[in-house]
Image (cartoon, rainbow, N blue to C red):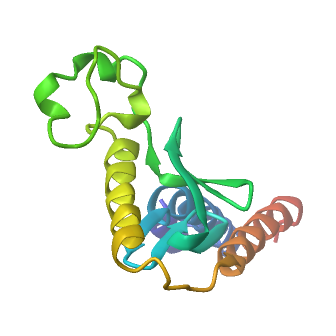
């Protein structure tokens, strides 16, 4: 649509299409593609649409999952957008063999967020493995905890939204 508007339409139509294409494309990138979880021996990095959190395992107070993988640090809960839980009925389809060897007790009820079939369940299992390994082997390693704001993503969204508004108001 953007290419067709640029090639066939007027200059105003082409610029408007480019602005809307950048706005929608960047929004989709921020919400669907950018979120990720990076696990390493000393800590975890959670990349969300607006923030990137790097946390050492020695600072982690609690690992859990309700709707997403959640990490508690300094009485603050950080949710990972990259590891959402599946629906509430998905845990009903679990079989005892699905959780065998994972350290999860299957006594007839497993929370949907802890299901090994969900993204949050797989992420919390791997995070707990790294966390327990850190505690047993190298509990004295310290990495700096950091929070980085995604300025470039917000600037791109803001510029595209502003250009859409300006091109909507002013026609040439």
Q: Residue 98's quadrant in the figure?
A: top left
Which residue is drawn at the image coordinates 85% and 67% (left, top)? 166
Res 79 seen here = yes
Q: Is residue 160 left or right of residue 138?
A: right
Q: Is residue 74 left or right of residue 35?
A: right
Res 69 seen here = no
x then y, percent, for residue 93: 23, 18
Q: Residue 150's quadrant in the figure?
A: bottom right
Which residue is drawn at the image coordinates 32% and 22% (left, top)? 90
Q: In the rendered image of this protein, does residue 97 appear above or below residue 54? A: above
Q: In the rendered image of this protein, does residue 154 appear above or below residue 119? A: below
x then y, percent, for residue 61: 60, 57
The total number of labels drawn is: 0
Which residue is drawn at the image coordinates 20% and 34% (left, top)? 99
Which residue is drawn at the image coordinates 35% and 69% (left, top)? 136
x then y, percent, for residue 133: 33, 68
Q: Nearer the viewer, residue 66 or 156?
A: 66
Q: Is residue 46 left or right of residue 110?
A: right
Assign the C terminus to one quadrant of the image.
bottom right
x then y, percent, for residue 52: 60, 72
Q: Nearer the viewer, residue 24 or 50?
A: 50
Residue situated furthest left in the rendering: 97
Q: In the rendered image of this protein, does residue 9 appear above or below residue 124? A: below
Q: In the rendered image of this protein, does residue 126 appear above or below residue 51? A: above
């Amino acid at each position: 649509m953007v290419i067709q508007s640029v090639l066939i339409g007027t200059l105003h139509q082409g610029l408007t299409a480019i602005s809307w294409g950048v706005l929608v494309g960047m929004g989709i990138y921020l919400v669907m593609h950018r979120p990720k979880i990076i696990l390493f021996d000393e800590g975890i990095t959670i990349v969300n649409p607006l923030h990137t959190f790097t946390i050492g395992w020695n600072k982690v107070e609690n690992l859990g999952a309700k709707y997403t993988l959640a990490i508690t640090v300094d009485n603050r809960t950080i949710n990972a957008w990259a590891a959402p839980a599946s629906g509430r009925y998905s845990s009903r389809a679990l079989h005892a063999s699905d959780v065998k060897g994972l350290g999860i007790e299957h006594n007839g009820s497993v929370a949907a967020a802890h299901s090994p079939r969900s993204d949050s369940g797989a992420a919390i299992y791997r995070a707990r493995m790294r966390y327990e390994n850190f505690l047993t082997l190298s509990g004295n390693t310290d990495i700096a905890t950091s929070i980085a704001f995604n300025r470039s993503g917000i600037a791109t969204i803001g510029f595209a939204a502003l250009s859409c508004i300006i091109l909507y108001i002013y026609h040439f």
